[in-house]
């Protein structure tokens, strides 16, 4: 096979990837934009993680947050929830290659049982944040800390705001 074949193959693969990334927003309801690395570091700092907690990244994308957390905190139970199968497959590949304990589950975050969560990370569009806020208010059975990049939960007052990085921190408590 000549060099032309490989050039054409790379072009076809690039086109497929381009359209996948572009169209996945329409197919799965949200596009992909990773949380910037400096923001990930600050989010982890604000989450004040403890060794034995259960931590979720809702809409985990290609796994940037769960990979970083499981590298730093090997004992934390770290779970990514992601609706897009390609991102799930890639994240599983990276986790396996790096022998990290985090897992990623292909699911709709609004239908997933989050009652065992201690900390939740998010970078989701506003409509989803509102639905997630309502879900946590009605379902949480213990205190849950939510650390959100960029978008707020509209009807809940954050316990902390990092204006520079646009991070909002919320504490949810179960109904008494
Ligand atoms: C802006 S990206 C954030 C990715 C990742 N948290 C990060 O910071 O690198 C949002 C992700 O949420 C996923 N997503 C959107 N709606 C979802 C849903 N209902 N359930 C699960 N994942 C969803 C998208 O596929 C996308 O990968």
Image (cartoon, rainbow, N blue to C red):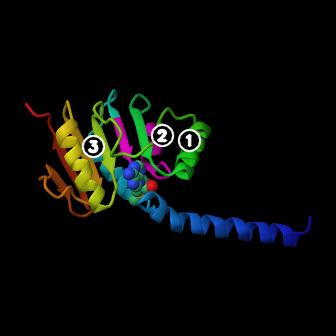
Count of number-bearing discs: 3
Is 98 a magenta residue?
no
Q: How much space separates mark 3 and mark 2, taking CA atoms?
A: 20 Å
Q: Which residues are magenta?
A: 55-72
Is 69 a magenta residue?
yes
Percent x, y of residue 97? 62, 39
Residue visible at 43% across and 49% down in the picture: 60
Q: Quadrant of ligand 1?
A: bottom left
- Any mark on residue 104, and which? 2
In the image: residue 98, left or right of residue 76: right
Residue visible at 36% across and 39% down in the picture: 112
Label 3: which residue?
47
Percent x, y of residue 95? 55, 40
Q: Quadrant of the N terminus?
A: bottom right
Label 1: which residue?
92
Q: Nearer the viewer, mark 3 or mark 1?
A: 1
Tag 1, which secondary structure? helix
Whether tag 2 and tag 1 are in contact, CB under 8 A, the answer is yes
Res. 175 visible in picture: yes
Local packing at callout 3 (Cα closer than 10 Å; few below 14, some 14-19, many 20+) is some
Q: Is tag 3's residue or tag 2's residue first in the polypeptide sequence?
A: 3
């Amino acid at each position: 096979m000549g060099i032309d074949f490989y050039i054409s193959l790379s072009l076809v693969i690039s086109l497929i990837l381009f359209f996948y990334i572009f169209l996945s927003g329409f197919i799965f309801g949200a596009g992909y934009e990773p949380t910037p690395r400096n923001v990930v570091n600050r989010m982890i700092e604000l989450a004040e993680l403890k060794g034995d907690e259960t931590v979720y990244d809702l809409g985990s994308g290609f796994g940037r947050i769960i990979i970083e957390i499981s590298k730093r905190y090997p004992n934390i139970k770290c779970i990514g929830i992601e609706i897009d199968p390609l991102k799930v497959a890639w994240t599983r590949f990276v986790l396996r290659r790096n022998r990290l304990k985090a897992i990623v589950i292909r699911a709709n975050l609004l239908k997933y049982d989050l009652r065992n969560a201690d900390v939740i990370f998010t970078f989701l569009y506003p409509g989803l944040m509102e639905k997630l806020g309502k879900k946590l208010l009605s379902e949480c059975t213990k205190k849950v800390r939510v650390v959100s990049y960029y978008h707020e939960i509209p009807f809940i007052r954050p316990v902390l705001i990092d204006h520079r990085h646009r991070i909002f921190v919320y504490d949810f408590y179960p109904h008494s």
